[in-house]
Image (cartoon, grey):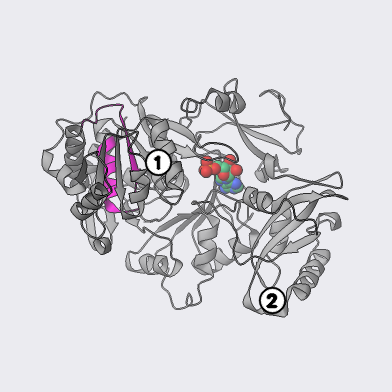
Amino acid sequence: MNLGLSLLYAAERTPEADAVVDGDSCLDYRDLQRVAAKVAGGLASLGVGRGDRMALVLKNRREAVELYWACQWLGAVVVPLSWRVAAADVAYCVADSGATVVAFEDVGLEHARACTDAVDRFVAVGTAGAGSSADLAARFCAGGEAQPCEPYESLLAAGEAPGAPEDLDDRETSIFLYTSGTTGRPKGVPRSHAAERAGGLSQSLHQSYRPGERTLGVMPLYHTMGIHTVLAAQIVGGCFVCQPDWDAAAALELIESERIGSLYLAPTLFHDLVHLPDLAGADVSSVHSLAYAGAAMTSALVERCVAVFAPEVFINHYGSTEIYTYSVDFDQRAAPGCAGRPATNARLRLVRPEPGTGPDDEVAPGETGEIICHLGSDEAFAGYWNRPDADARAIRGDWYFTGDLGRLDDDGNLWIVGRIDDMIISGGENVHPLEVEDVLERAPGVREVAVVGLPDDRWGQAVTAFVVLDDELAEAGEHAAVARLDAYCLESADLARFKRPRRYRFPEALPKSPSGKILRRVLREQNAGLRR
Ligand code: AMP
């Protein structure tokens, strides 16, 4: 079933159920389906047809959700892009995708301006504080742009796009998600209606969504976690409560006021949330399902989340933009950080992590190997957009090579060891950042930590910890901090002596991706010359 029909079914099944909340505005499924059909009509009047690409540079807000569903209704391909990256990066993705229309809000004005060589039309989406859509459109044009720019509301006036998308094949493309990976240009990941819907279905199943589930919509809609949160909610007549900017205190208020039932966030966001100072008085009793993805969660953080939310289910979702779910662990309380068993739609193998290995080069039981996932998954992509080089690297036979290392424990559960690219070879021994981070994260005085290997004359690579300290330890001074952390690692039974950091750095914050992943690559690049 394509996603336009999926919306129609939801509107017929639960017309009165809340679908989107954004500040004071709330749309139920009946409203959402009608608005989507109208906006689809407006997009058609701008010349957007089936298969055409439409780019969004928008935060998580009602209009972004409406435009997303309008594209699904029309059979157009939505290309949600990050407003956090440089304007030139957005322009690259817009040109690469061949988008003909860009919708933007205030924060994306410069990004939109950077796209005028490639794009015919623009849609301005107003923001209360910064003026109406018409004002924003006027500001865009005042920059000397020759291309027409419509205020968003005018799309609603064009009349509904005729009919429902009954004849759209669900193998057609629904969305392009851009993934930056570890090196090089961002890659477009086209995903079909069928694959996207399968991802929404499996998420609602894995995360125990209830009818009318209410979920916090803060993971960006240009990331696979954000968009699947919309889709999973729609499967159960659930509600996506928009939070445009991450702010832990504001998120806590939304959890209370909107009676949020499910939280599906990157670990960093959970970290901010459970370390809020005034958490004790908050009513978080509505939350029954916790899930994280995007990066491993340390056991210290799992324990803290359990203490704060006492969730019924606590899931680790391991997946990617290319194939939405690889594996799921259903009880993080019992095994913090464990990535569990292959997901409903996935088949996994571990193969030798060497260049040129094939899908049949499986490692022996218990050994670390590269995780590969069969492309027969209902949630899989079918190759990158115009990137035969990337296809050749990642797809061998019918298998997708994730670039992640993992191992199976005696019970057959998967543990993510880290990215192949992040592995540290120090004194000839392999050290994976996560095992060191997991220990250091528990040390008193540590807020956040990232571990990388930096060039070292003696060790080849020196295990180097970048630690954000709490105020108390920071005041004690760097010397004292190093001594205490080193002593903690030496005493820890979980870390071999040779794996403990040889160097420490104490930045105020760690570099992170928009989805909250710590960017070890950036730490490596910025500190490559550090020799001490
Ligand atoms: P993305 O395509 O941005 O979602 O990134 C996918 C990558 O994020 C995976 O290949 C992993 O390296 C990492 N990742 C995703 N989920 C998890 C998880 N639950 N635990 C550890 N790493 C994860």
Q: Which residues fall within the magenta stretch?
A: 47-71
Of the pair 151 and 73, the residue shown nearer to us? 151
Locate residue 98 relative to residue 32 in the image: left or right: right
Report the residue that reaches farthest toward the front.
Answer: 144
Is residue 237 something that shows in the picture? no
SS label for mark 2: helix
95, 328: nearer the viewer: 95
- The residue carrying pointer 2 sits among few (fewer than 14), some (14 to 19) or many (20 or more) residues within 10 Å by Cα, namely some
Q: Nearer the viewer, residue 17 or 77?
A: 77
Up the image or down, 215 lies above or below 309; here it is: above
In the picture, measured across the screen, residue 12 lies left or right of residue 472, that is left
Residue 174 falls left or right of residue 444: left
Q: Quadrant of residue 191?
A: top left
Residue that badge 2 annotates? 473
Question: Dot 1 corresponds to which residue?
Answer: 200
Q: Indicate the position of residue 78 as horizontal and vertical percent values.
A: 34, 37
Q: Position of residue 403 (x, y in %)?
A: 64, 36
For label 1, count other residues whose C-alpha is less than 10 Å away and answer few (under 14), some (14-19) or many (20+): many
Q: Residue at x 11, y 43 (%)?
A: 157
Residue 395 counted in the magenta span: no
Residue 521, relative to residue 40: is it above or below? below
Q: Within 8 Å of ligand 1, the CB of disc 2?
A: no
